[in-house]
Image (cartoon, rainbow, N blue to C red):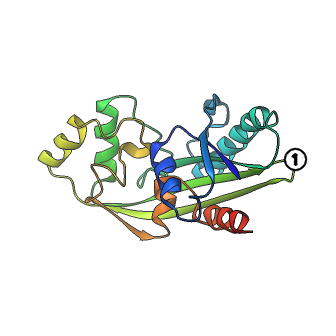
Amino acid sequence: MRIFLASASSRRHLWLEAQSWVEPHDISIVPLDVDESKVMDVSDVSSTVRNVVDLKIESARVFLSEIEGDWIGIVSDTMVEDPVRKMAMGKPRDSNQAREMLSALSGRNHKVWTCTGILLARDKGDMIYTESAEVFFRDLDTDTMVDLIESSSWTGKAGGYDIHGRASELVEVVEGSEITVLGLSANSMTALREILEK
């Protein structure tokens, strides 16, 4: 079975490739160009990740409809919810914004929302899963903050951190699944495994 991952995230790709139940299948990366700002509502994080995934599904279907035979498409979006303002944090534009985000997360629990859509060939329908995980971010002292900012590990990461990167020893998933924080809905991956093992 051919799997098309419509995501630029190397973490998602690496995680999928590492799963024994995915190994026999061929994974290809499909770049998508969607304007997420059209559906962005920073005050409703769970709805926004769902709306972004709907946009990505629409875009992915255009590309995938040209492919013959059986295939599975995967799209996903992840957002970090500001623990104080309860709004979407997005990806930092620069090091100053990354510092602001990390300062807001420091010493607090926060939610990470992920929505993942699974598309099936021949219009067999889409399966969409939205879920959250609660993460604790350790207090950041000055040296640790400087290290995170100067390492540029915040680049392209929701909330300014990567759970499998430089911040791995600073965060702990206290409720929910780590894969949700990484960028794929845990329930969607259970469904994907069931499909691939049939």
The residue nearer to you, when weighing 22 against 114, is 22
**Residue lying at 33% horizontally and 37% vertically, measured from the top left:** 98
Q: Residue furthest bottom?
A: 175
**Residue lying at 61% horizontally and 31% vertically, measured from the top left:** 37
Q: Residue furthest right?
A: 123
Q: Helix or strand or loop: what does disc 1 sit on?
A: loop
Pointer 1 local density, CA inside 10 Å: few below 14, some 14–19, many at least 20: few
**Residue lying at 60% horizontally and 32% vertically, measured from the top left:** 31
- With 54 as the anchor, is 124 left or right in this view? right
Q: Quadrant of the C terminus?
A: bottom right
- With 106 as the anchor, is 174 left or right in this view? right
The residue nearer to you, when weighing 88 against 52, is 52
Q: Residue furthest front?
A: 24
Picture layout, residue 145 above or below residue 125: above
Residue 108 is situated, as x and y percent measured from the top left of the image, at 33, 60
Residue 134 is situated, as x and y percent measured from the top left of the image, at 45, 65
Residue wearing tag 1: 122
**Residue lying at 35% horizontally and 43% vertically, measured from the top left:** 101
Circle 1: residue type? Arg
Picture layout, residue 151 above or below residue 27: above
Residue 24 is situated, as x and y percent measured from the top left of the image, at 61, 58
Residue 50 is situated, as x and y percent measured from the top left of the image, at 67, 49
